[in-house]
Amino acid sequence: MSFIKSTIVRMILSGIAILPLPIDRALGRLIGRLGLLFQTRAAKVTRENIALCFPHLSPDAQQALLKKSLAHTATMLFEMPYAWLGDKEKLLASLVSVENEMLLDDAMSSDRGVIILLPHVGNWEMFNIFFSQKGKMTALYQPPRQKYLHEFMQKVRQSFGNELVPTNAKGILRLYKTLTSGGVVTILPDQVPQNGEYIDFFGHKALTDVLVPRLIRKTKALALCCTVTRQRDGFLVRFSQPDPTLYDPDIGASLEGLNRTIETAVSPFLEQYQWEYKRFRERPLGEKKLYKFDREKDVYHE
């Protein structure tokens, strides 16, 4: 049964992968509108996150951001197969602009390891194809819940020469070894960890992983932030320096610098950030839980 499921999924993704990028994006906008119309869970989470993080925006402005965000979220679903299975030359051609590339080149030419902070904004999967021009990198990998997809996901994400390591002790050790040897690792730093510290993120406490500060402290690695965002005719790759406090030896201060780095990087592209993710699902002791959607008492209206 797992083989059959895996085969069907591969066929569907392969079919989507051959669609032109404009078609992917048109389908994404359509699915986003339907999500808003039918008030899907993604729409409800997005609405709550936007209201929580941007209370200063007017209701109309929040609604506009909600609509754009849902469209970009749905677009990502269609762009993933494009990024995983598309023709390499076409993928590279779709990277129409790269800003501050010298930051990466300078960091890689140093004698220190490099940590790439890759937030969930735009199409982060396209970073694999971009970095294939630079060499190899090691990235943390969270296996999908559907076990029949595990082998397929590993294969497509390593197809451009990158190394995936699991989010366990063995994988973390591999990150340390890569950095101490002067290599490059990529981490998506805005996910809810099993353990961490509550640090401000867009004005609210969010459980934040301590891995990046610990890697920097142990290996003296350099860090850069990278975003891959949608432009009219392709993607923009942008590198930026992290907030200086990321290098603070105090873990709490370093985590504050980490979250400020993410905020600064994604703020020009707020509509492309993954607001449908339950970033604030873990709350500090004494604070009420979020994302409790009671269908009978749901007060969300157009």
Image (cartoon, rainbow, N blue to C red):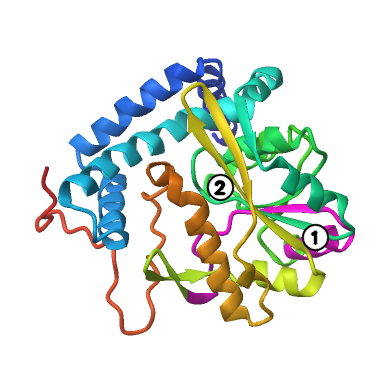
Is residue 163 in sight in this rendering?
no
Q: Tell me how far mark 2 sits from mark 1, CA to CA.
A: 20 Å
Q: Quadrant of residue 289?
A: bottom left
Q: Label 2: which residue?
A: 144
Nearest the viewer among 252 and 11 is 252
Q: Which residues are magenta?
A: 172-198
User: What secondary structure is marked by label 1?
Assistant: helix
Q: Label 1: which residue?
A: 174
* Total numbered circles: 2
Q: Residues within 10 Å of mark 1 (few under 14, many from 20)?
A: some
Across and down, in percent, residue 2 comes to 56, 36
Does the magenta run of residues contain 111? Answer: no
Question: Is 238 placed above or below 140 here?
Answer: above
Across and down, in percent, residue 23 comes to 43, 17
Is residue 287 in sight in this rendering?
yes
User: In what quadrant of the picture does the N terminus appear?
Assistant: top right
Kind of residue indicated by mark 1: Arg
Across and down, in percent, residue 58 comes to 18, 52
Nearest the viewer among 30 and 95 is 95
User: What residue is drawn where x is 42% and y is 24%?
Assistant: 25
Is residue 138 shown left or right of residue 56?
Answer: right
Question: Is 142 placed above or below 272 here?
Answer: below
User: What residue is drawn where x is 64% and y is 46%?
Assistant: 239
Across and down, in percent, residue 257 comes to 57, 69
